[in-house]
Image (spheres, rainbow, N blue to C red):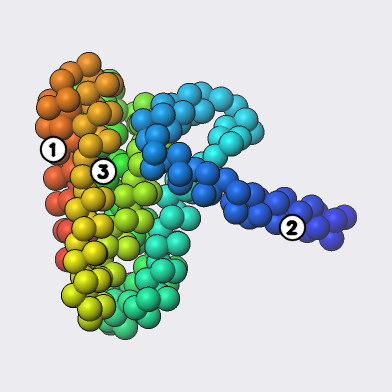
């Protein structure tokens, strides 16, 4: 009986992983070209039964994790091991493996999703609870993932010697910031019923808070 349970678990795990090969690129494409649609999709899916949620996409937190894992894989292939893994001073000693580094990046980039979600609830006057926060946070994971991937690719340019690659990396970073702020401005504008300029202001405030927390944790670790 135990052996059959193992086989059944393996069957489900294999199907899940193989499904990622289809649904991950579909989810990434939809998150890039129709981010507001995906955020609204996350809002609807949270209310469904757990076994009926995200039937044609990757669950948002998992989508963010897989995206960071791909970004990390690209970094290893292009630049080799991250210097942070060799650092044994202070809190950097806690980041002693690729998995630990991936977990750190997951926390850092999740700050953007979290601060955007919290900002929205505050401006809507909605009580901050686990249930209320989950809906906008899940939607934010869909947009944070492409943002994190572009940031990861853009920052690789400092490991390359050619000036053209460094310029290309800077362009990717600026494009990532512009895309992310534009999406968030539209999201705040639509959800709060305010102008696009006011939506940009809300997005900028939330992003600045997230950046302060991001770099504070980064400095503590590095």
Q: What is the x, y in percent for residue 217?
A: 21, 60
In terms of secondary structure, where does tag 3 sit? helix
Residue at 62 percent across and 30 percent down: it is: 52
Position of 82 relative to 124 (above/below): below
Q: Which residue appears at 40% of the width and 62% of the height?
A: 71
Q: Which residue is mark 3?
A: 179
The C terminus appears in which quarter of the rendering?
bottom left
Say what secondary structure mark 1 lies in: helix
Can you give x and y, in whole percent of width and height, for residue 181 in the image?
21, 40
- CB-based contact (under 8 Å), mark 2 and mark 3: no
Circle 1 crowding by C-alpha within 10 Å: few under 14, some 14–19, many from 20: some
Tell which tag, 2 or 3, sits nearer the viewer.
Answer: 3
Residue linked to disc 2 = 10
Q: Is residue 141 above or below residue 74?
A: above
Q: Position of residue 190 (x, y in %)?
A: 27, 21
Q: CA distance from mark 1 to mark 3?
A: 16 Å
Between circles 1 and 3, the one closer to the viewer is: 3
Percent of width and height locating residue 36: 36, 30
Residue nearest the viewer, comparing 143 with 208: 143
| Residue at 64% from the left image edge and 49% from the top image edge | 19
Residue 35 quadrant: top left
Q: Nearer the viewer, mark 1 or mark 2?
A: 1
Q: Is residue 150 visible?
A: yes
Q: Quadrant of residue 74?
A: bottom left
The residues bearing labels 2 and 3 have C-alpha atoms spaced at a distance of 39 Å
Name the foreground residue: 127 vs 216: 216
Foreground of the two, 112 or 216:
112
Residue highlighted by disc 1: 205
Left or right of residue 200, residue 28 in this image: right
Q: Earlier in the sequence, mark 2 or mark 3?
A: 2
Characterize the local packing of mark 2: few (<14), some (14-19) or many (20 or more) Cα atoms within 10 angstroms: few
């Amino acid at each position: 009986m135990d052996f059959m349970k193992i086989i059944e678990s393996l069957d489900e795990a294999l199907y899940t992983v193989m499904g990622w090969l289809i649904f991950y690129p579909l989810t990434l494409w939809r998150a890039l070209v129709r981010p507001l649609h995906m955020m609204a999709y996350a809002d609807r899916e949270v209310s469904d039964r757990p076994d009926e949620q995200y039937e044609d996409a990757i669950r948002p937190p998992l989508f963010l994790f897989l995206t960071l894992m791909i970004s990390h894989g690209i970094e290893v292939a292009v630049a080799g091991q991250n210097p942070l893994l060799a650092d044994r001073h202070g809190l950097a000693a806690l980041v002693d493996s690729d998995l630990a580094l991936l977990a750190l990046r997951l926390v850092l980039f999740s700050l953007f999703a979290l601060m955007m979600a919290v900002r929205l609830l505050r401006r809507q006057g909605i009580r901050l609870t686990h249930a209320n926060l989950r809906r906008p946070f899940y939607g934010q994971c869909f947009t944070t993932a492409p943002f994190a991937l572009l940031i990861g690719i853009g920052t690789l340019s400092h490991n390359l010697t050619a000036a053209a690659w460094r310029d290309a990396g800077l362009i990717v970073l600026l494009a990532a910031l512009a895309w992310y702020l534009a999406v968030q401005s539209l999201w705040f504008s639509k959800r709060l019923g305010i102008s696009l300029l006011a939506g940009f202001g809300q997005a900028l405030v939330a992003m600045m808070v997230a950046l302060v927390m991001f770099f504070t944790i980064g400095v503590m670790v590095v």
